[in-house]
Amino acid sequence: MIFKSITLHNIFSYYGSCSFDLEPPADNSGNIVVIMGRNGFGKTSLLNSIKLLFGGVTEELRQSVQRDKPPTAKGFVVGDKDWWGILNHQAKIKGDFECFVSAILLDDNHREYEIKRAWNLYGGNYQSELTITAPRKAPLVGEDANNYLSALLPLDYIPFFFFDAEEIGYLAEANRNKVIERMEQLLNIRPADNLKECIKRLTRKIERDSIAPDAKLELVKAENRQSEMRIHRESLQQEMQSVGSDIETLEEEIRELRQKLRLFSGQGAIENNAKFEAIRNGELKNQENALTALSEMFERDAFLRLNSKQIQNTIPVVDVCVNGQRGINAEMLESLREPLKEVFTTPPYPDYRLTDSQIAFYQKRITKLLDSRDIEEEENIPFRLDIGRAKKLLTTISAYAPQHIPEQPLRNLLSQAIQADNAINDIDKTLQDVRLLSEENKQQLLQIQDRLEQRQDELTKLNKQLSDIAHKLPLIEREIKPLDEAITRLTQQARQSEQAQTRIELLDKMQKLLAAYKQQLKERQRGTLEKYFNSHLASLLDSNNLISEAKIDELFQLHYLDISGNPVAMSSISAGMKQLAATALLWALKDACGRQLPVIIDTPLGRIDKQHQDNLLSRYYPHAAKQVILLPTDSELDERKHRLLEPYIYREFHLYNPAGENTEIREITRSKETHYG
C-alpha cells in the first residue's frame, strides 16, 4: 500500500488546502519522494499530520510537545499556555476553525482508499471526525471507521513506519516493554497473547461465579487492588525507561561538552577558574553522594541484590514452607489453638463448671496436643520455618528475583561514581593545561561551562529520580505478592465445584496450547528477525569495529557482541551508531513482518557521518519500502548526496515558509541529466 496523495488543510504550518501528489509513475522507475525544506518550513508538520491521521492524538504526539508535562488530548488539539494547538495560526486569526488531514492510498491492485480526519474547533471542541471510503464499502464513520483503520494500519505500527530518524536511537536497545510489545504486534505474535487474555478473563468469570458471595466480594476487592498496583508498577517501569533514555541523551551531550572544553584547554588558559572549580566541586559532591548511597545499600540489602539467581533458587524452598502440606497443617493447627483454649472460658458453661486450675490444666494439655501434631516432616526440605515467618521471608525475597533486575540501582550508583571520577580527572587536566584565552573564546567557554553545569544538575536530578523509582518498585512487588496469594486462594474454592472444575481445566489446557504455540511462533520470528538485523547492520555499519554481531534473546531484547563474542556496553555506542542500528532494526522488522506499507522519515541523515550517510542513501532508502518519503533539510541533502539518491527519486518537492505560518509546496521537475543545485 502506498500514498497516492496527501492533503493538509489549516493544520500546523499549512494554511488553506495544500496537497502533495505522490502517485508513482506508470513504469515504477523509482520509490523515493523527497520533500525538502529548511527547519521550521513544514516537514515535521507533515509527519505529525500523518501520525494524527492514522492514530489520532497519541501519547507520543503529546510528549513531542513537552516530555515532562505533555498536554492533555484536548490541550494538544486546541492548545494551552505552552502550545498553540493543531490549528494554523493564520486560519485562527481569520476565524476559520475547520482543519483536516486526508490521504488517498493505493493497494497492490490499484484500488483507492480515502482516509480523512477532520476537526471543527469552534467553541473549544476538540473531538475529531474520521471518515473512510474503501472499495465496495459504504463510507465508514465513527467506531466503524476506527476499527477499519486499526486493521489497515494498527496503532502500534506507526512508530516503525513514520518517524524522525534522529529520535529512533532508543530502538537500538529494544529493551523496553512497550517497544518489545510493538515488535511482537508487528511480527503477528501478540494475537496469541490477546487470545490468552480472553481465556484468562473467562476463567476468572467462571471462578467468581462459582464461589460464595462473601468470598466473591473479597476476591473482587483483591483483584481491584492488584490491578491498581500493577498499573502503578507499569507506570513506574515506563517512567524508569523514559528517565533512562533522558539520562543517556544527557550523558551524550555532557561528553560532547567536555570534549569542547578539552579543545579550549589546548588553545589557552582561563584567567578565572571559578567555574571549573565549581563544576569540580559539584562532581565531587555527586561522587560522594553515589558512594554514600552505595555504602548504605551494601549495609542494607546489596547481598540480596547481587545474588538474584540464588534468591530464585530459594523462593521455591520457602514457598514449600508456606504452601506445602506441612505449612497448610501448621496454619490450620495455629488457627485452632486459641479457639480451643477459649472453649473453657466462654459461655455456654457446663452444669458443673471447672475450677481455674482445671481450666489451666486442660488448656495446657490442648496446647501440647497441638504441638505434638505440628511435627510432620517433609523430605528434601533443607530448613524449617513457621508459616508466619516463611510468608514474611517469601514476600521480602520475591522483590529480589532476577526478573526485577534488583542489581540495577547498584549499577546506576557505581556508574554515577565512575562518571564523576572521570569528570574530576578531566577538569583537573584542563586546569593544569590552560593558557590565556581571547575575549571571544572566554565568552564561548563560559557558555559551554554554564550549559555543562546545567546538564550535570539535570543529570543528578534524573539519577536521583531513577534511584527513587528503583526503590519504589520492590515495595510494590511486596504488596502485589500477598494479593496474588489471596486471589489464588479464593479462586481455588471455585475449582472445588465439579462443573466449574471441568470448564476451568479445559480453559487451562487451551492456555497451555496457546503458550506453546506462541513460543514456537516467537522462536521462528526471532530467528528470522535476527538474521535480517545482522545482515542490514553489516550493510549500514560496514566501517564499524565495535559491534561484530547482534543477538536477539527469547524476550526480544537486543544484545551487541564484539569480535571476541564479549558484550558491548550500550553506553559505549555513540548516538550516530545507535541511529544506524535502529535503522537496521526497522529495516529488518519490515522484511520479517512482510507488510507493504509506506515509510516516512524526517531528518533522514541526522547525526550520521559521511560514509554511513552514503550507505543509507545507496543501500537502505532505495530498498526500505515500495514508497519512501524523505523529509531532509537543504543542508542534509547536498548536491553530492542527491546524485546518489537521484536514480530512485520519482517525485520531489521543496517547502517554503519564511514567516512560519503558511507553508508553500513547490514541485521540482528534473530530468535525469539535470544536476542538483
Image (spheres, rainbow, N blue to C red):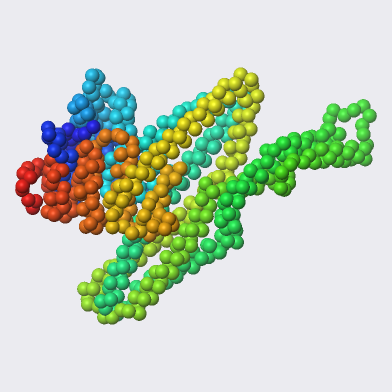
x%, y% of residue 558? 40, 48
Please give the name of the residue rendered at 42% of the width and 43% of the height, measured from the top-left corner: 556
Relative side of 469 to 482, left or right: left
Q: Residue furthest front?
A: 564
Kindly indicate the quadrant of the structure image that contains residue 450.
bottom left
State whether residue 451 appears in this view: no
Q: Position of residue 432 (x, y in %)?
A: 35, 80
Residue 461 in the figure: left or right of residue 230? left
Give residue 258's position: percent from left, percent from top: 33, 67
Tell which of 658 and 145 is nearer to you. Answer: 145
Query: Residue at image x 28%, y 72%?
Result: 263
> What is the quadrant of the N terminus in the image?
top left
Q: Is residue 346 visible?
A: yes
Q: Which of 90 and 43 is in front in this view?
A: 43
Q: In which quarter of the image is residue 428?
A: bottom left
The residue depicted at 61 percent of the width and 23 percent of the height is: 501
Residue in the image at 26% along x and 78% along y: 268
Image spot of residue 488 (x, y percent): 61, 33
Question: How many numbered discs?
Answer: 0
**On screen, residue 131 above or below 647:** above
Viewer-proximal residue among 489 and 29:
29
